[in-house]
Image (tube, rainbow, N blue to C red):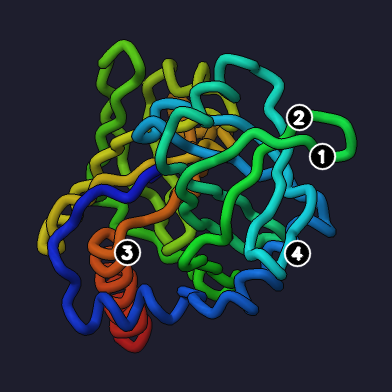
């Protein structure tokens, strides 16, 4: 999600799961930010409760004052809207590693003669390694349902095909799925996990492909999660673990 929603106080297990990815040491945070600036990776900044976004890159990190510059966006109205917000969320996937962190007030400054944004270090930064994206297939005969609502409030029902802490593969026969642009954001998506409850997540569409069937085709929509809440992450982790245990038990006969 673009700005994590208020969730119930996490259990000890949920806190341990989330904190295993969380960095709070300013020196370590500065190191990650400098790496992002050096690589010049594009990152997406979400704000206005996830309703607005802009694409940017980190330009320079100032470890002495614990702040950093990032690039001015291409749409001036979005730039001004970001400056007016009190909170935003950076999300990026440098080298296949998901990095996300919240920031507070954003200032307008000048960098090498051009307008730029400036913000203080985040208090925490989450970095999910590739190994955290372990993916399992879900039951084919009784799939977990998923509901997506588009900007015009039109709902679409899909089935979860595979799942990881990094993202989800969705399947549907609805032709409207072919019209979903790659890179688009699907906000407030609901995934029903049965015994593990219903989670609400925000997704970025990474790829769409057709899957031939006997008489027709269905569409596979590959998505990545945007900044999972602690509760959603914990529930997904429990389900993934259970599905893997079920798979191993079935393989043993």
Which quadrant would the C terminus be assigned to in this image?
bottom left
> Could you give the CA–CA distance between mark 4 and mark 2, rounded to whole angstroms?
20 Å
Disc on the earlier residue, 3 or 2: 2
What residue is at 30 percent from the left and 30 percent from the top? 148
| Pick the front one: 36 or 214 | 36
- Report the residue marked by disc 2: 115
Q: Is residue 28 above or below residue 63?
A: below
Q: Secondary structure at mark 3?
A: helix
Q: Which residue is mark 3?
A: 233
Q: What residue would you read off at disc 1? A: 111
Image quarter for residue 149? Answer: top left
The picture places residue 223, in percent across and down from the top left corner, at: 49, 44
Which residue lies under the disc numbered 4?
34
At horizontal 61% and vertical 51% (from top left) the residue drawn is: 92
Dot 2: few (<14), some (14–19), or many (≥20) neighbours within 10 Å?
some
Among numbered discs 1 and 4, the one appearing first in the sequence: 4
Instruction: Tell me the SS state at disc 1.
Output: strand
Q: Secondary structure at mark 4?
A: helix
| Callout 1 touching callout 2 (CB < 8 Å) | yes
Q: Give the percent coordinates (x, y) of residue 94.
A: 70, 57
Residue at image x 67%, y 69%? 30
């Amino acid at each position: 999600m673009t700005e994590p929603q208020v969730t119930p106080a996490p259990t000890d297990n949920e806190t341990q799961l989330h904190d295993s990815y969380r960095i709070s040491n300013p020196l370590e945070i500065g190191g990650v930010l400098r790496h992002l600036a050096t690589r010049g990776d594009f990152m997406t900044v979400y704000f206005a409760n996830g309703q607005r976004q802009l694409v940017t890159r980190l330009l320079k990190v100032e470890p002495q004052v614990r702040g950093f510059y990032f690039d001015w966006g291409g749409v001036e109205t979005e730039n001004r809207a970001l400056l007016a917000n009190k909170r935003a969320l950076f999300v990026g996937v440098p080298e296949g590693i998901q990095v996300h962190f919240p920031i507070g007030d954003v200032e307008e400054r000048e960098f090498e003669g051009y307008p730029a944004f400036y913000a203080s270090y985040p208090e925490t930064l989450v970095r999910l390694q590739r190994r955290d994206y372990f993916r399992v297939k879900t039951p084919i005969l009784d799939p977990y349902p998923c509901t997506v609502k588009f900007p015009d409030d039109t709902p679409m029902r899909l089935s979860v095909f595979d799942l990881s802490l990094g993202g989800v593969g969705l399947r549907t026969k609805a032709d409207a799925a072919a019209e979903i642009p790659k890179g688009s954001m699907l906000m407030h998506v609901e995934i029903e996990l049965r015994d593990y409850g219903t989670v609400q997540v925000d997704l970025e569409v990474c790829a769409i492909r057709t899957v031939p069937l006997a008489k027709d085709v269905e569409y596979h929509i590959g998505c990545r999660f945007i900044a999972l809440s602690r509760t959603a992450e914990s529930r997904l982790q429990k389900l993934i673990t259970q599905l893997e245990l079920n798979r191993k038990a079935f393989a043993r006969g």
